[in-house]
Structures are given as C-alpha cells and as structure tokens.
Image (cartoon, rainbow, N blue to C red):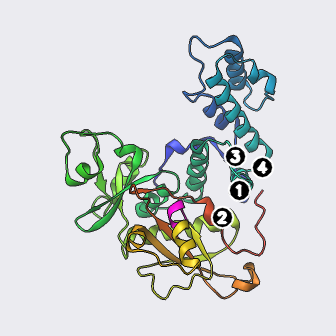
Amino acid sequence: MNDFWLSSGHHLIDRDASGRLLPTDAFFKAYAARPELVPPSEACKAERELHAGLLAQPRRHVGADQIAAIADPDARENWEQMIAFRDLLLRRKTLEAAYLDLVRRGVGKTPPLFIAQLVHVILRNVLDGCEDPFMLRAAELFFRPQCMTTLNGSLIAADHETVSGASATPLSPLVSMLGIPAGAGIDVLGDDNADNYWNRSDVFDMALDLTAGRRGLAALGDVMERWASHMLAIDVTIEPLTEMHEVDLTWYVGLDATSTGIGNALWNGEEVDAESRAAIVGLYRLTFDDPGVVIESIQGEPAYLILARSPDNMLRMKPQNLLTGLPLRQLEAVS
C-alpha cells in the first residue's frame, strides 16, 4: 500500500475503535517544535521556560499569566493562539470532534494555518488506503489554495504556494502562466504520470485538470462523499454536472466565498452575469441515501454544491461549508 502526505503528521496520531483520530503527546510536541514557536536566542526567560515545559509535558496547563509574562508582543500572540488551539483539541476526544466544534461555533482567532493542518491530517485518515492519485490530488483543494488558469482549453489548478515565486525563464507554457520558479517541475496529473504522485505528494507540485466533464471534478466529488460520511456519519452521492440549466436550487451550499455569492444571487432570482457563470469551477448534485436525515421541507430533493474561483483566479475551498451547510435534521455529534 502506498503512503502519502507524510507532512500531515498522521504517523504521530492514534485511532479509536471508530477510526477517528486521537492526538498524542508526539503530535502536540510537533506543534511546539514549529519554527514560529521555537524561541530565538534573544527570547526572554518566560518564553524559553514555557517552550521547554511544553516539550517535556505537551498537555500541561498553561495559564494566561505565563503567556502575559513573555516580553515580545508577537511571541505572546503566537503563544496565545497556539495554547487556545491546543486546549480546544484537549477538550474534545478526537481531532474530528475538535474540528466540528471549531467550524460550528466559529473559528474566532484560530489561525487559518491551524485549520488547514487539521483538515490535512483528518483527510489523510479519511483517505487511508486510497490508491487513486486523482482523488488524493483533488483532496488537496480542501486545505491548500489553488491558482487557476487555462491551458490548451483546459482549466488547470496548481498549488498556490508552489507557484507563488516569479521566474524570468519559465520552463513551459503552464509555468509561464502561473509564474512558477524556473527550478520547479510542475506537471499536470494524468494517466501517464499518476504513479509519480506517491513520491511527490508532499511537494504539492502536480497540477489538476478541473475541466467540466473530466476526471478531476469527479474525483473531487468522490472525496466530498467520504468527507461527509466520516465527519457527519451520513451517506451521500455527489455527482458532477456540466450545465446549470434546469438546476432548481431548493438547497445549495457554496464551497467558497465566491460561489456562495453566486448561489445567493440565484436563490434570490437575480440574473447571474456571464463573468460569474464563467467563474464556476464545479457544480454538483448531492442526494441523500437516507432521506430521513434531511429536514422535512427538503426531503426527496437534492442539494447542490457550487465551487468557484475568485476574480484573482484563486480557488479557496472551504470544506467546513459542506459540514455546516447541509439541510440535516440533526447534526451528528462526533466525539
């Protein structure tokens, strides 16, 4: 069996009988070892003692007075956010329960980086045993923003962090369009190079074709099915659509800020202009295997999922919307 996403830290995690993630001391120590939290040589005594104490006992209580004693204001803020996040994880039995608690109550001051890391490791668990590189690459959209461009008539998503450098000597048309550094090797995932994904999964340097009717969008739908099943204990079928006509938005979920705006306009009967329609990357029909889990007014009707790129051609998926936006009769309390 192929391994992937070692950077998620899944090897530091235990699992309960239901297959959900139990954070370990090693997992918490990995956070304390992050570069943002390792005290620099000029750090004050209070910061050094706090850091050393957490490396020795990562679940130890940290009081507000200990953080307030740190001299550097930026370091204080970092530690406030880190301890608040750690305490959230400690209050819930599993990482899945902590994530649901976070997105249902509101993320507050939790850094987006921490939320993305939670999604990363949870998805690694959800997709354990998956042997389809297209599904794994599509799953990266859940926790890594994408740059979108067209190449030879295809709509291509490439990892934003990977392509954020500039280059005066691009290596290919795709590199040129996305501004990838000359030293980077970006390939569009396809049948001919899919086996390469396993060795490159932590580099995030394989782009994905998200053209309507092709494999990438179907793979993303498969991942969303597993995400809903694992996190909400419901079974759904998610089918990609190629056209918006004859779609009755009885219920919809926008999977990002742009698509939420488009969905709101359609819901209110407003005309959606050509530019907004062109921004739509994916449109899905979601049906519930058990209609009884849905509120009565929606029973028997599908829900629709919309995914869109922003005006700056970025795709910033919010997987939490799928968990909080469905018309469920009662949300499962994952422990």
Q: Is residue 167 above or below residue 229?
A: above
Residue that numbered label 2 is attached to: 323
Q: In the rendered image, which quarter is residue 9 located in? A: top right
Of tags 3 and 1, which is closer to the observer?
3
295 left or right, relative to 33: right
Instruction: Return the x and y of residue 58 as percentages of the image width and height.
Output: 72, 30
Mark pair 2, 3: CA separation: 18 Å
Of tags 4 and 1, which is closer to the observer?
1
The magenta stretch spans which residues?
255-259
Question: In the image, what residue type sits under mark 4?
Answer: Lys
Residue that numbered label 4 is attached to: 93
Q: Where's the C terminus, which quadrant?
A: bottom right
**Helix or strand or loop: what does disc 1 sit on?**
helix
Mark pair 4, 3: CA separation: 21 Å
Q: Earlier in the sequence, mark 3 or mark 1?
A: 1
Question: In the image, what residue type sits under mark 1?
Answer: Leu
Q: In the rendered image, which quarter is residue 12 located in? A: top right
Instruction: Return the x and y of residue 119 as percentages of the image width and height.
Output: 59, 52
Question: In the image, what residue type sits under mark 2?
Answer: Leu
**Helix or strand or loop: what does disc 4 sit on?**
loop
Is 257 within the magenta?
Answer: yes
Rate crowding at label 4 as few (under 14), some (14 to 19) or many (20 or more) other CA atoms within 10 Å.
Answer: some
Residue that numbered label 3 is attached to: 108
